[in-house]
Image: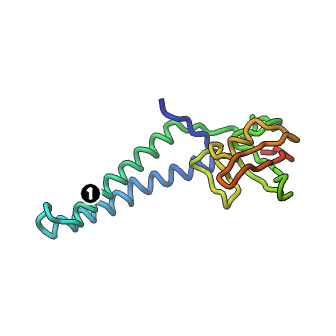
């Protein structure tokens, strides 16, 4: 069974645009590379042809994965989300109890994760640790650098 992907409308549109770009420009570019390599003669010893065919296989694999993700995508209606606990698409203000620093994270699917934009994956260690927590609760999260303690300060949408 394929894994369900939960997305925002913005994330869904981004994936659709990426798929269209791969199907059109990506395929056209690889077809051009294959044609150029064919014109250079003997295909049995043509490294450019082999590289272009490998690139074509990789592109088709990416397209198939993206198509599968889109077919299993569910857009979450933000108006129906509960803000009493941390869940997918929650914006969570947390305080690191060791450094006393506060951070704002939005929990999103792996496909939408962008740490620089404050969007963390629900499948990341921090995302997993925060899921299900309520305001005031402390999440103890094991990360590669050790154990972090985050207190949930606020949950919004």
Q: Quadrant of residue 118?
A: bottom right
Which residue is depicted at the point 26% across and 57% down? 53
Horizontal arrangement in the rendering, residue 47 relative to residue 83 (left or right): left
Horizontal arrangement in the rendering, residue 111 relative to residue 146 (left or right): left
Q: Looking at the picture, tell me which residue is in the foreground, 73 or 92.
A: 92
Q: Position of residue 57 (x, y in %)?
A: 32, 52
Q: Position of residue 2 (x, y in %)?
A: 49, 33
Q: Position of residue 62 (x, y in %)?
A: 41, 50
**Mark 1 falls on what kind of element?**
helix
Q: Quadrant of the C terminus?
A: top right
Decide: is 80 above or below 15.
above
Which residue is depicted at the point 75% across and 34% down? 80
Q: Quadrant of residue 78?
A: top right
Residue furthest to the left? 42
Which residue is depicted at the point 38% across and 48% down? 61
Horizontal arrangement in the rendering, residue 99 relative to residue 88 (left or right): right
Horizontal arrangement in the rendering, residue 37 relative to residue 42 (left or right): right
Which residue is depicted at the point 56% across and 48% down? 111
Q: Looking at the picture, tell me which residue is in the foreground, 94 or 6.
A: 94
Q: Quadrant of residue 45?
A: bottom left
The residue identified by callout 1 is 53
Residue furthest to the front? 146
């Amino acid at each position: 069974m394929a894994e369900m992907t939960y997305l925002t409308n913005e994330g869904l549109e981004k994936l659709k645009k990426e798929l269209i770009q791969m199907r059109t420009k990506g395929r056209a570019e690889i077809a051009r590379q294959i044609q150029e390599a064919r014109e250079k003669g003997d295909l049995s010893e043509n490294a450019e042809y082999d590289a272009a065919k490998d690139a074509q296989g990789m592109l088709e694999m990416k397209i198939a994965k993206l198509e599968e993700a889109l077919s299993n995508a569910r857009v979450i209606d933000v108006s129906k989300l509960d803000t009493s606990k941390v869940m997918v698409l929650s914006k969570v203000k947390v305080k690191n109890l060791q450094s006393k620093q506060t951070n704002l994270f939005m929990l999103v699917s792996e496909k939408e994760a962008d740490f620089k934009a404050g969007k963390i994956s629900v499948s990341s260690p921090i995302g997993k640790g925060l899921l299900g927590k309520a305001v005031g609760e402390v999440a103890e999260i094991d990360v590669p650098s050790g154990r972090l303690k985050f207190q949930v300060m606020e949950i919004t949408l």
